[in-house]
Structure formats: C-alpha cells, structure tokens
Image (cartoon, rainbow, N blue to C red):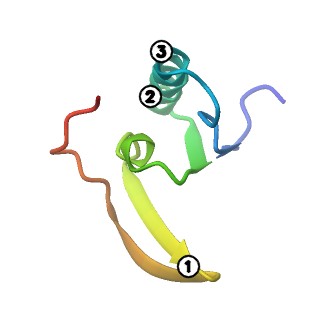
Amino acid sequence: MNRPAILLADEPTGNLDSATSEEILALFDQLYRDGQTIIMVTHEADVARHARRVIRMKDGKVLSDMPAEKDVIHA
C-alpha cells in the first residue's frame, strides 16, 4: 500500500465541496512531482485539466489521447 507503482483514482473529487476538491488535486500534483504515476477517472472537465494527459473514451473506445488543456484557468 505504501508507494504503489500506480495510484488509481476513480472520481476522487465526486461529491466533494470545491475547497476539498482543490486539496485533493493539490495532493495529486505533489505526488506527481514526487514521481508517482496517477491514473484518474473523471467526468469533470475542470478536474481533467489538472492532468498531464487526457484520454477520452466512449462505449469502451478511445476517442482522443492528448495533453490536457493547460491554457484554461482553474476556477
């Protein structure tokens, strides 16, 4: 459980208030800077913008695979 090769996060900010969501995303940012690989599933575009890479899927098929849009300011 300590320092897994990959951290899987399924909707980690779902049903959280915005302040707590930002805390979680800041923690993920720090873990990434420390070398942790994180795979996060989300339906929220503003959460996905925290990622380095975004893979969009529909009906089990990859629609796109590209760097996240970093030009959008986080709310």
Of 38 and 58, nearer the camera is 58
Q: Which amino acid lies under the numbered mark 3 shown in the image of this protein?
A: Ala
Which residue is identified by label 3?
A: 19
Q: Secondary structure at mark 1?
A: strand
Q: Which amino acid lies under the numbered mark 2 shown in the image of this protein?
A: Asp
Give the mark toward the camera: 2 or 3.
3
Instruction: Say which residue appears at 55% left-offset and 79% top-offset.
Output: 58
- Of label 2 and label 1, which has the lower sequence position? 2
23 left or right, relative to 1: left
- Of label 2 and label 3, which has the lower sequence position? 3
Q: Secondary structure at mark 2?
A: helix
> Gap between marks 1 and 3, in whole Å?
30 Å
Which residue is identified by label 1?
A: 58
53 left or right, relative to 8: left
Instruction: Say which residue appears at 58% left-offset and 43% top-offset.
Output: 38
Tell whether label 3 touches label 2 (CB within 8 Å). no
Image coords of residue 28 (percent x, y): 52, 29
Residue occupying the far right of the picture: 1
Which residue is identified by label 2?
A: 29
Instruction: Say which residue appears at 41% left-offset and 45% top-offset.
Output: 51
- Of label 1 and label 3, which has the lower sequence position? 3
Image coords of residue 52 (percent x, y): 37, 48
Q: Which amino acid lies under the numbered mark 1 shown in the image of this protein?
A: Lys
18 left or right, relative to 36: left
Which disc, if any, is residue 6? none
58 left or right, relative to 67: right
* Residue count near mark 2 (Cα–Cα under 10 Å), binned few <14, some 14–19, many ≥20: some
